[in-house]
Amino acid sequence: MNKPSIKTITVKNLVTFLLILSLILLVITGLNLRALSTKAIENQALAHAELVRAGLTAHMKAGIMDKRDYYLNEIKQLTQVTNVHIVRGQALEKQFNPDQPWQRITDPLTRQAFDTGKPSFTLREFSMNPSIRVVIPYIASQKHSLNCLSCHQVEEGEVIGAVDIELDVTEYRNHSLVVLAIIMLISTVFLILIRVNTNRTIQNHVQAPLETLIDNAMSAYHNQEPLKEDVFSTKEFSSVANEINLFNTEIIAHQNQLKDKNDELLSLNDEIESTLRETVYTMGVIEEQRSKETNNHTRRVSLYSKFLAQQLKLTDRDIELITTAAPLHDIGKLGIPDDILFKPGQLDGKERGMMEQHARIGYTMLCHSKRDILQAGAIIALQHHERWDGSGYPQQLKGEEIHIYGRIIAVADVFDALYSERVYKDAWSIERIKGLFEEEKGKHFDPVLVDIFFANIDEFVRIYKSHPSTVKDLS
């Protein structure tokens, strides 16, 4: 899963915060602007209504109330005025139109003005043609120059009528929308500028220095040189660079110590391996000496085995293991009694059975070690007398059930025994040996190894001649 960058997270959080803040500010600004606009509209409507009331009062003083309709029509011609009319109260209707039944006022806004004695307003700002309507009551009083009580049969403070006027406020509404649009545009531009500036700031002071810090830290680590702190413009990254230098110094020091220890361990392991190889070879030579085999038999079997393993293209480690462990193939003979091991004549059945035990004895001597060389030696000691057709000993393994180490040693050991001169026999000729191997191909020996042997028999002869042996006296 792809993770967001520091820049993305920072900008996203900042923009989200600013958007929320901008929305809050826009709502507050819009509400305040609406309140101010509403107040201005109400004041304008109230001014128009007061103008109408003042004009009607003047008509009353002049005794020309019969001309008031003309005056009201002129008022209607004023800009923004869409309607104006006079509402009489119950007292005036009874005084001037006693014969007409009084029509109860049903309009809620007018009723509110008459009931409270205060101007009543209603604003329709969300319609296609926004407007404001105001109803201003006339209150009877004898405190001013116009004594209402002298003309009207009313009581002090009674509402005797009202001016009902409606104004078109489209201009106010449009002006408010323009102001809000400007505020939103400025806010949007401001947000864009903040985002761009934040992106650039993070890029220049966080992301780029961080990438430089990572690259330089890797380079400083590999080159084992200090990280330059003056390439960073901020205190934090310079401090991190200094910490990385301290860390690298400690790591390099520990690595050098580990390298020295590792070199020591490798050297010690090489020494152990070398000692083990020498020990294994010496054990083979000891067995060779005790068994009175021809000398150099152990060395030659190792070299034959190495050559065969190479021809089979085994791994380097397998080649090394079989070469090193080959001297242990007859190590189990150390556990065979001398009277059987050195018997000059043929062994009887019981004696041969005891002699064959040397394979298991060798395996038992070596199998408990966890060293791979000795583990290979255990396999070789146990299986080098197994036969391809399953007639060998001690487990009667067949074909590829026999480990490749055992199959290789079988070929190498038999060839060397036949080609070597012993006190009880002459050395066999190459032709006679080839005849035996041809006869035992697929019986005693792995057919593939026999083919390799036939194709490279000169190399086997060369190895023998490079490490010749002499016949040992059995007396």
Image (tube, helix red, strand yellow):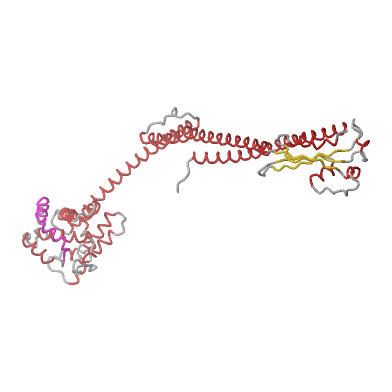
Which of the 4 image quadrants contains residue 48?
top right
Q: Residue at x 56, y 36 (%)?
A: 188
> Furthest-bottom residue in view?
349
> Furthest-top residue in view?
230
Identify which residue, 110 or 244, lies in the foreground: 110
Specify whether 401 is left or right of 233.
Answer: left
**Depicted 267 relative to depicted 330: above or below:** above
Instruction: Locate residue 181, reporting x and y percent.
Output: 60, 37
Identify which residue, 71 or 309, lies in the foreground: 71
Specify whether 222 is left or right of 116.
Answer: left
Q: Residue at x 8, y 64 (%)?
A: 435
Specify whether 457 is left or right of 231.
Answer: left
Please tell me whether residue 192 belongs to the stretch shown in magenta. no
Task: Pick the quarter of the image with the C terminus.
Answer: bottom left
Identify which residue, 105 or 333, lies in the foreground: 105
Q: Residue at x 60, y 38 (%)?
A: 22
Total number of numbered discs in the rendering: 0
Instruction: Locate residue 445, reporting x and y percent.
Output: 16, 64
**Depicted 138 relative to depicted 323: above or below:** above
Please tell me whether residue 462 belongs to the stretch shown in magenta. yes
**Depicted 382 relative to depicted 147: above or below:** below
Considering the whole magenta stretch, tell me its main secondary structure.
helix
Which stretch appears magenta?
444-467
Instruction: Locate residue 106, reporting x and y percent.
Output: 81, 49
Identify which residue, 454 or 223, lies in the foreground: 223
Q: Residue at x 33, y 44 (%)?
A: 265
Instruction: Locate residue 75, reporting x and y percent.
Output: 76, 35
